[in-house]
Image (cartoon, grey):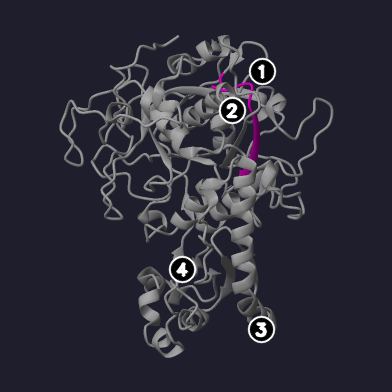
């Protein structure tokens, strides 16, 4: 496996004076992930990202009145911070002929060089931290007798979350854009092509709708694929659960009226902090295929992340992707992520992005609403926060969805299969309440409040059995209800019962 290292210079946006060059030089080892010092020496020339101490201040973002205005504000601030602080570093790297690539999603520059260069950069007063970046291999629990099956109509998992009831009310996800970063997508699959934003029914235009963060290798897709391509099947399967519908009997998706855009962040199931970050940056302001003309107005409303990066897989520092994810959320985009498949111990939700407060984390249940044995549990101990996770659970056992070649496959297991249900629900919710677009707090609160409360028998994070929310099911199993409860109205002050998911004070019901 190719070893690559990130130099993540996570900055403080405070007004405190930067340390002197002498102080920074003396303390350079404290900035470097010990993993780099332990293993990097054997790798020779390695890859790393340089993101400088100067980070964008996003104060004032919440005051923007629309998702589009919010997105433009955040992107402009992020790009400006990178432009003003990266210039000296970029000039140095260019003068030395060092391979590098600039990012602005968290103000960082990817670099390939030696450990001597890592040390030199860590000595700079404008460098906050040097993080390791190890390629992460996608891991799924054992499948349930995988098989190619004939059309089954509306899939049981889609019905279980009550999506068809929303369809009957005229809410199918219309007007909403869903983003996915995964192993890629079989864009012209019969269940996916009509929902692809880059397809007008006659011709395809992939500008601002597709990005490939895999720049070498790439399996059957090759590197830098100019059109959506899946080198694994995982991405196509997850996308099917979000929006899949072939117009016939294969009704596999929660929000068939939504449009989708995509980014490949894994090479045959192997990703890295660099590829994940590149896709997040793309979704903030999608570009044309040449990487030019970024357009924040083309950003999705929600991003599904059916991947997980634990310490054992390279995310040795829990904050490695925190700034990236927080910046995306600040732009009014809901970030949904799989809890991971490391259960059934408590505190097994232990890596990015699932551990972050800025992420809506999803565990997996079966058709009887029992927690899947593999579904990772909270609380989050990795970063010392002990926050409650997951936020909710959704069907993730024996899921049938689309796979490459225009076919379908059943029996897939994983929290990877669960999180797309939530991304689909966000689309349905926004088609019913477009005024909530960009209000991530209200959207997340609404999903928590409408979930079916489920009590856990397992005590995790000190939450006793019988209490909801808990660190096994979160606020409960995903469910769509109409009319929406008061918790979904951003203009109201909410009582604690709505925050906790207790709907006893509300007269609504499942339609």
Q: How many marks?
A: 4
- Measured in 3D between alpha carbons, the distance from the residue under mark 4 to the one under mark 1, in whole angstroms, is 47 Å
- Measured in 3D between alpha carbons, the distance from the residue under mark 2 to the one under mark 3, in whole angstroms, is 51 Å
Q: Percent from the top left, x then y, of residue 228?
A: 69, 40
- Residue occupying image coordinates x 54% and y 12%: 154
- Residue occupying image coordinates x 37% and y 60%: 316
Residue 104 shows in the view? yes
4 vs 2, front mark: 2
Q: Is residue 474 left or right of residue 129?
A: left
Q: Is residue 444 left or right of residue 243?
A: left
> Where does the magenta region start and end?
252-263
- Measured in 3D between alpha carbons, the distance from the residue under mark 1 to the one under mark 2, in whole angstroms, is 25 Å
- Residue occupying image coordinates x 28% and y 52%: 385
Q: Which image quarter: residue 391?
A: top left
Marked residue nearer the N-terminal end (4 or 1): 4
Describe the element under mark 4 as helix, strand or loop: loop
Residue 396 shows in the view? no
User: What crowding class fits label 3: few (fewer than 14 Cα within 10 Å), some (14-19), or many (20 or more)?
Assistant: few
4 vs 1, front mark: 4
User: What crowding class fits label 4: few (fewer than 14 Cα within 10 Å), some (14-19), or many (20 or more)?
Assistant: some
Query: What is the number of the mark on residue 96?
Result: 3
Question: Which residue is label 2 attached to?
Answer: 434
Marked residue nearer the N-terminal end (2 or 3): 3
Q: Percent from the top left, x then y, of residue 245?
A: 63, 19
| Viewer-closest of 124 and 41 | 124
Up/down of 394 relative to 461, above or below: above
Task: Tell me whether the residue at label 2 lies in contact with that at label 3, contact meaning CB atoms closer than 8 angstroms.
Answer: no
- Residue occupying image coordinates x 49% and y 82%: 124
Question: Which residue is label 4 attached to?
Answer: 11
| Viewer-closest of 230 and 172 | 172
Q: Quadrant of the C terminus?
A: top left
């Amino acid at each position: 496996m190719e070893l690559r290292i990130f130099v993540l210079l996570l900055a403080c946006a405070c007004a405190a004076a930067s340390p002197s060059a002498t102080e920074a030089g003396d303390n350079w080892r404290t900035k470097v992930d010990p993993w780099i010092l332990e293993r990097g020496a054997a790798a020779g020339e390695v890859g790393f990202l340089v993101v400088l101490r100067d980070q964008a201040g996003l104060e004032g973002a919440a005051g923007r009145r629309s998702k589009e205005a919010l997105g433009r504000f955040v992107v402009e601030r992020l790009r400006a911070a990178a432009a003003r602080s990266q210039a000296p570093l970029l000039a140095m790297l260019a003068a030395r002929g060092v391979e590098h690539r600039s990012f602005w999603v968290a103000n960082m520059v990817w670099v390939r060089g030696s450990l001597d260069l890592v040390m030199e950069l860590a000595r700079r007063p404008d460098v906050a931290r040097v993080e390791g970046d190890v390629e992460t291999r996608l891991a799924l629990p054992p499948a349930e007798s995988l098989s190619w099956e004939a059309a089954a109509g509306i899939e049981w998992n889609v019905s279980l979350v009550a999506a068809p009831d929303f369809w009957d009310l005229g809410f199918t996800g219309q007007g909403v854009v869903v983003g996915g970063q995964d192993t890629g997508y079989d864009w012209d699959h019969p269940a996916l092509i009509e929902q692809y934003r880059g397809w007008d029914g006659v011709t395809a235009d992939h500008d601002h709708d597709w990005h490939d963060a895999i720049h070498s290798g790439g399996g059957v897709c090759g590197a830098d694929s100019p059109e959506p391509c899946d080198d694994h099947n995982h991405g196509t399967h997850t996308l099917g659960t979000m929006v899949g519908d072939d117009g016939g009997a294969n009704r596999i998706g929660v929000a068939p009226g939504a449009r989708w855009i995509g980014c490949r962040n894994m090479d045959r199931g192997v990703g890295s902090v660099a590829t994940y970050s590149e896709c997040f940056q793309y979704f903030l302001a999608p570009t044309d295929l040449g990487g030019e003309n970024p357009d924040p107005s083309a950003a999705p409303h929600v991003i599904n992340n059916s991947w997980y990066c634990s310490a054992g897989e390279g995310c040795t520092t829990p904050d490695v992707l925190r700034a990236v994810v927080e910046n995306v959320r600040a732009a009014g985009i809901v970030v949904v992520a799989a809890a991971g498949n490391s259960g059934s111990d408590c505190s097994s939700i232990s890596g990015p992005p699932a551990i972050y407060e800025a992420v809506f984390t999803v565990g997996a249940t079966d058709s009887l609403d029992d927690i899947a044995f593999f579904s990772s549990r909270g609380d989050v101990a990795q970063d010392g926060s002990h926050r409650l996770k997951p936020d909710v659970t959704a069907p993730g056992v024996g899921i049938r969805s689309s796979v490459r070649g225009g076919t379908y496959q059943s029996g897939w297991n994983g929290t990877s299969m669960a999180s797309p249900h939530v991304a689909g629900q966000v689309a349905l919710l926004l088609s019913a309440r477009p005024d909530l677009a960009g209000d991530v707090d209200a959207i997340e609160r609404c999903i928590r409040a409408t979930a079916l409360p489920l009590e856990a028998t397992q005590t995790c994070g000190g939450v006793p059995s019988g209490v909801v929310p808990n660190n096994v099911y979160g606020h409960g199993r995903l469910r769509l209800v109409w009319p929406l409860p008061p918790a979904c109205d951003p203009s109201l002050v909410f009582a604690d019962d709505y925050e906790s998911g207790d709907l006893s004070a509300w007269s609504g019901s499942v339609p």
